[in-house]
Amino acid sequence: MTLIPPATDIARLDLPRPYLLFLGDVTEAGYAKTAFGLRDWAREQCVGELSFANAISIGLPQLTPAEAKARGARSMVIGVANVGGRILDTWVPSLLEALVAGLDIVSGMHSRLATTPALAAAAERYHRRLIDVRTPPRDIPIASGRKRSGKRLLAVGTDCALGKKYTALAIARAFQQRGIDSDFRATGQTGIMIAGRGMPMDAVVADFEAGAAEMLSPAAEPDHWDVIEGQGSLFHPAYAGVSLGLLHGSQPDVIVVCHQPGRTHMLGHAQFELPSIEETIDLNLTLGRRTNPGIRCAGVSLNTSQLSASDAQQLIAQESKRLRLPVADPIRGGVEFERLVDACLETR
């Protein structure tokens, strides 16, 4: 399913598909979100995975680069999103193996592939491409703050890596299934790989964050919806700046707050407790009113992947009653998700 049609605002990427997904030595699911995202939203473009012993698996066939090439793969994607976006020395032999096998390498890391001398030399020798997805376009403007035509929904969260991308993708798909003119707007490396276009917000120079969000979601027809993937959290000690620039620049009419039940502390920053859902709603609305006084919260998206179906259903009902808002897990769907979509589309 193509969620973003051809347009002139953000250039489409020419990514060599299908993919072999590289997981390296990652042992925590939160740091393999790129691989999980591609598996779940672009499964037909994924031929298999390559992970080290004792590393996490995403359930795809375990393949060497040569085996993946034989099955039609054209590139190996680094499916990892570690702290700082670094390419580890322990990964380099596998990346070199992919180049030798005839695969390009696609990366969403902050570290540029070509800054690793061995990779740059091998790519030149074997005539392969090193593709860095986390590269913002040139000439991003300073934000104007002017209200734009069209409608916008932004997924925000209590933390990073807990479902903002999945929520935005699911809502965009639900809008389109209802015949609503809408686009998914990607703001992170995984979303960009899925959609083929987007703005890598966390790679944009700080002064241009809000301008990049304006560029990502330009003026549109009055009834058109842009469903924008969120980044980080306004409460995160490392990533709040990106979250705020995206909030101000996207000027959302509607936010959906994303949360993972059971998570109590910030991913990678265990000394910081997670805010409550209520705190997250209040702060996003308070700061969002700077560029859109009419901003509202439509409801809450819960990532209940760690719960049984019955426990998830019970929690969703309890939270909806407690918060007096629609609450759903977009991946589980059901009537709760339809209510959340209805609330997003309410006219006020």
Image (spheres, rainbow, N blue to C red):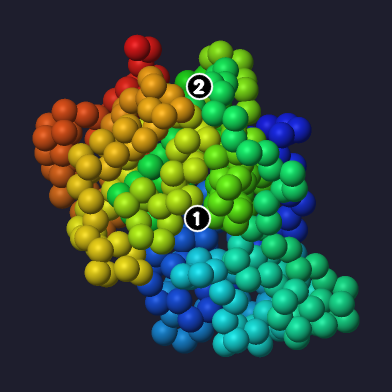
- Which corner quadrant holds the C terminus? top left
Residue at point 47%, 35% (across, down): 248
Disc 1, SS? helix
Instruction: Answer with left or right where residue 275 lies relative to residue 24.
Output: left
CB under 8 Å between callouts 2 and 1?
A: no
Residue at point 66%, 87% (across, down): 93
The disc placed on residue 49 is: none
Q: Which residue is under mark 1?
A: 37
Q: Type of residue at label 1?
A: Gly
Is 338 situated above or below 56? above
Residue at point 64%, 65% (across, down): 107
Q: Which residue is under mark 2?
A: 151
- Compute the Cα span from label 2 to label 1: 26 Å
Is 346 situated above or below 118? above
Indicate the position of residue 207 as horizontal and vertical percent values. Answer: 58, 47
How crowded is the residue under tag 2: few (<14 C-alpha within 10 Å), some, or many (20+)?
A: many
Residue 337 in view in this figure = no
Is 331 situated above or below 177? below
- Mark toward the viewer: 2 or 1: 2
Which corner quadrant of the image does residue 290 belong to?
Answer: top left
Residue at point 76%, 68% (across, down): 130
- Which corner quadrant holds the N terminus? top right
Q: Nearer the viewer, residue 112 or 235?
A: 235
Instruction: Answer with left or right where residue 59 lies relative to residue 308.
Output: right
Disc 2, SS? strand
Indicate the position of residue 72 as horizontal and vertical percent values. Answer: 73, 64
Is 332 situated above or below 57? above
